[in-house]
Image: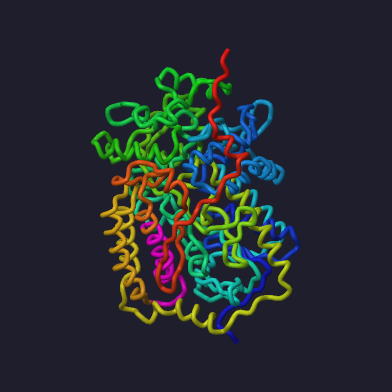
C-alpha cells in the first residue's frame, strides 16, 4: 500500500477563489470529472476580500458606457503593456458573466428601476462597478460556491499542492498534502488549472491573507511555464495603518468611489498636485467641481462634471500618499486621512457596511464621525503565468492558469474592479480550455514512481533537520528585503543589493528545519511555502532591475521617464534554466488596426 491517497480526475483545479470556482463550474458542465483543491476552507478564498465591485460595462448608470470604453480604460491603466486580446475578451464578456452571476442568485445593489447598480472607481471613465455594498467578493464566492457544490464537484479542502507532475512534456497530475494531519495525496489529471492568487506574503505590509505565497506562480515556473511582467506589483493606496495588528488590511477603493476625500496632516486635499498631465483633463480642478460630481452621486444622477482627483489610478494615488508621508505631511501613525464623514451617516453605513464595522471593531474609529488613517499596502501582482488569451493555456501542454496567478491581462497596473471580472471571464475560459484539452486525451498520463518519491522526500526533508534554520526567521528576513529594496520606488543599487541578499538568504531555505510531526504543524507548511515565496521574490526583483524605465506600478528613481519606443514594446519573461532563473525580453503582442483606432485622437470638427 502506498502511504498516500490517490485521486483521479479529468481536470484538477488548484485554488477555490473566483477564478478556480468558475473554472471548475465550466469544466464540470461539460460532463467530465473535476477536482477542486483549496488551501483553506471552501468559501474562505481571498476573493471575499475584494469589496468595491466587479467591473463590467453594463451601462446601467452611465448610458454612454460600452466595451470599447472599458477596453480603452484598461489598456491606458496598464500603460499599453497589456495583452490586447485578453483585454478585449475581458471587456466584451464581463457584462454577460455578471448577468450570469445574477441568474445564479447573486444579490446586487439596485438602481431605482431595478437594474444592477454601478459605482465609480479609479481609472474608469464611467460608473462601471457592479456591487453589493462593499462585500461584492463575498457575494461572488457565495454564488459560485453554491453553483459548484450543486454540480457535484469534488472538493479537497485544506489541501496544499507542492509539485506538479508530468508525463514527458505534458501535465500528468499533482502531489500535495493535507494541512490538518499532513497525510500525502496524489492527484492524477489530464489537465490542471492554476488559480492560486498572488504573492503578497513576500512583503511586510500587505492586504493579502496567509494563503498568498505565490504557489501557482512557483508551481508553473518549476513545470516549465513562463512568468511575465513580474516587476509590476500594485501597492493599493489605502490600507489600514493602525493599530499595528491590522496594518495593511484593505480599505476599499469604494470609499473614494462614494466620494471619500484624501487629506494630509495640514488639511490639504493633496491629490490635485499629483495628477499626471496626460490625464489631468479628466479630473476636477477645484473642490467646487469635485463637489458637483459627488452631489450627483448622492442624488443618484448622471453628471458631466469631471471626477474627483482621488479617483486617479491606484499606482498614482499610492505614490502620492507615499510622498506626502515621506515629506512630513503624514498622519499620526504614518499614513494620510481618508474622510467620508461629511456624508449622511446612514448612507455611509448602507454603502460601506464592511468598512464601518472594520474600523469600529479593529481601530475604534467611527468613519461616519471622523477620518480614517490609510497608507499603501502591497495588494496585487500584475505578473503571472503567460497564457494564451483565448484558452488560458500556458506553454506547458495541459497546464492552464486564470486570475491573479496568470499574467498579461492588466499590463503595468490593474484598474480596481477589473480583478473580479477577470476571475469570471478567464476562469470560464480556463475551465473550457482545460475540459477541451482533457477530452482529447483517451487515458490518464503516466506518472513515474520516481517523481512521486522525489516529491515525498522533498516534503519530509525539514523533519531531518530538527535543529535547522527557523523558517519564520527566514520569512521575516525575506519580507524585510522585499519591502526595503523592491518596494514602491526602486533604484538599480537597491535592486542589486536586494537580489544579492535574496541569493544569500535562499541558501538558508534548504537548511530550514522543523520539529514535531506532520499533524497541525504550520512551521512545516512554511518550509514549503518559502520556496514558492523566494521564486516569486527573485522573479520580481530581477524583472524590476531589467526594466529601465518607470511605467505603471513600476517606479524607478534612476529612470523616471516612460520609454514607449523601447520598453513599451516588450514584456519581461522569467523561466527556469536548470537550477538558475533566466530572464528574457519578449515582444508584446501586436494590437490589430481596428483596435488601434480607439486610441487615435479625433480632431475637432470646425463649425
- Determine if the magenta segment contains residue 523: yes
Residue numbers of the magenta segment: 516-541
The foreground one among 7 and 194 is 194
Q: Is residue 282 above or below residue 9?
A: above
Residue 26, position as x, y percentages in the image: 69, 56
Camera-side residue of 374 and 411 = 411
Q: Residue furthest top?
A: 607
Q: Is residue 26 left or right of residue 367?
A: right
Q: Residue at x 57, y 55 (%)?
A: 402
Rendered position, 279 above or below 192: above
Q: Tell me where residue 306 appears, x and y as whole percent.
A: 48, 23
Q: Is residue 502 left or right of residue 351?
A: left
> In this image, 312 relative to 596: left or right?
left
Q: Position of residue 435 (x, y in %)?
A: 69, 62
Whether residue 557 appears in this view of the structure is yes
- In the rendered image of this protein, does residue 347 appear above or below residue 197? above
Residue lying at 61% horizontally and 27% vertically, measured from the top left: 62
Count the labels in the image: 0
Q: Quadrant of the C terminus?
A: top right
Q: Quadrant of residue 57?
A: top right
| Magenta span includes 160 | no
Magenta span: helix, strand or loop, mainly? helix
Amino acid at each position: 500500500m502506498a502511504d498516500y491517497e490517490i485521486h483521479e480526475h479529468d481536470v484538477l483545479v488548484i485554488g477555490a477563489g473566483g477564478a478556480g470556482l468558475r473554472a471548475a463550474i465550466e469544466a464540470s458542465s461539460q460532463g467530465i470529472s473535476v477536482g477542486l483543491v483549496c488551501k483553506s476552507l471552501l468559501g474562505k478564498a481571498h476573493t471575499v476580500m475584494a469589496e468595491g465591485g466587479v467591473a463590467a460595462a453594463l451601462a446601467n448608470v452611465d448610458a454612454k458606457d460600452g466595451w470599447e470604453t472599458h477596453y480603452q480604460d484598461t489598456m491606458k491603466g496598464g500603460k499599453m503593456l497589456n495583452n490586447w486580446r485578453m483585454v478585449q475578451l475581458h471587456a466584451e464578456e464581463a457584462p454577460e458573466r455578471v448577468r450570469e452571476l445574477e441568474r445564479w442568485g447573486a444579490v446586487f445593489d439596485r438602481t431605482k428601476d431595478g437594474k444592477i447598480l454601478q459605482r465609480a472607481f479609479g481609472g474608469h471613465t464611467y460608473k462601471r462597478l457592479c456591487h453589493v455594498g462593499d462585500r461584492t467578493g463575498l457575494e461572488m464566492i457565495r454564488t459560485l460556491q453554491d453553483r459548484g457544490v450543486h454540480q457535484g464537484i469534488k472538493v479537497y479542502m485544506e489541501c496544499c499542492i507542492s509539485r506538479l507532475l508530468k508525463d514527458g512534456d505534458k501535465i500528468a497530475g499533482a502531489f500535495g498534502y493535507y494541512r490538518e494531519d499532513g497525510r500525502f495525496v496524489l492527484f492524477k489529471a489530464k489537465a490542471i488549472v492554476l488559480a492560486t492568487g498572488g504573492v503578497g506574503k513576500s512583503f511586510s505590509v500587505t492586504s493579502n491573507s496567509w494563503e498568498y505565497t505565490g504557489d501557482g506562480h512557483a508551481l508553473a515556473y518549476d513545470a516549465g511555464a513562463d512568468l511575465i511582467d513580474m516587476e509590476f506589483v500594485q501597492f493599493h493606496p489605502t490600507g489600514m495603518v493602525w493599530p499595528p495588528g491590522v496594518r495593511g488590511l484593505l480599505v476599499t477603493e469604494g470609499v473614494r468611489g462614494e466620494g471619500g476625500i484624501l487629506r494630509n496632516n495640514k488639511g490639504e486635499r493633496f491629490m490635485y498636485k499629483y495628477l499626471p498631465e496626460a490625464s489631468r483633463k479628466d479630473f476636477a480642478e477645484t473642490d467646487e467641481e469635485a463637489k458637483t460630481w459627488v452631489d450627483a452621486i448622492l442624488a443618484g444622477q448622471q453628471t458631466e462634471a469631471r471626477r474627483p482627483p482621488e479617483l486617479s489610478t491606484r499606482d498614482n494615488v499610492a505614490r502620492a500618499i507615499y510622498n506626502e508621508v515621506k515629506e512630513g505631511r503624514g498622519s499620526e501613525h504614518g499614513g494620510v486621512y481618508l474622510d467620508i464623514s461629511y456624508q449622511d451617516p446612514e448612507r455611509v453605513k448602507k454603502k460601506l457596511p464592511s468598512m464601518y464595522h472594520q474600523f469600529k471593531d479593529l481601530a475604534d474609529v467611527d468613519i461616519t464621525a471622523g477620518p480614517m488613517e490609510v497608507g499603501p499596502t502591497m495588494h496585487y501582482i500584475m505578473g503571472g503565468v503567460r497564457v494564451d488569451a483565448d484558452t488560458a493555456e500556458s506553454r506547458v501542454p495541459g497546464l492552464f492558469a486564470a486570475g491573479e496567478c496568470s499574467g498579461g491581462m492588466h499590463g503595468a497596473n490593474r484598474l480596481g474592479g477589473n480583478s473580479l471580472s477577470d476571475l469570471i471571464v478567464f476562469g470560464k475560459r480556463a475551465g473550457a480550455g482545460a475540459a477541451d484539452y482533457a477530452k482529447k486525451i483517451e487515458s490518464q498520463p503516466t506518472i513515474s514512481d520516481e517523481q512521486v518519491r522525489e516529491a515525498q522526500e522533498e516534503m519530509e526533508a525539514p523533519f531531518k533537520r530538527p535543529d535547522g534554520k527557523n523558517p519564520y526567521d527566514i520569512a521575516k528576513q525575506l519580507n524585510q528585503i522585499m519591502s526595503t529594496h523592491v518596494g514602491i520606488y526602486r533604484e538599480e543599487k537597491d535592486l542589486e543589493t536586494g537580489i544579492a541578499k535574496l541569493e544569500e538568504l535562499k541558501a538558508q531555505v534548504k537548511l530550514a528545519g522543523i520539529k514535531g510531526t506532520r499533524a497541525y504543524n504550520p512551521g512545516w507548511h512554511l518550509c514549503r511555502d518559502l520556496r514558492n515565496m523566494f521564486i516569486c521574490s527573485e522573479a520580481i526583483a530581477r524583472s524590476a532591475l531589467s526594466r529601465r524605465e518607470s511605467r505603471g506600478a513600476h517606479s524607478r528613481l534612476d529612470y523616471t521617464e516612460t520609454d514607449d519606443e523601447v520598453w513599451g514594446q516588450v514584456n519581461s519573461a522569467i523561466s527556469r534554466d536548470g537550477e538558475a532563473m533566466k530572464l528574457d525580453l519578449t515582444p508584446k503582442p501586436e494590437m490589430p488596426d481596428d483596435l488601434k483606432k480607439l486610441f487615435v485622437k479625433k480632431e475637432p470638427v470646425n463649425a
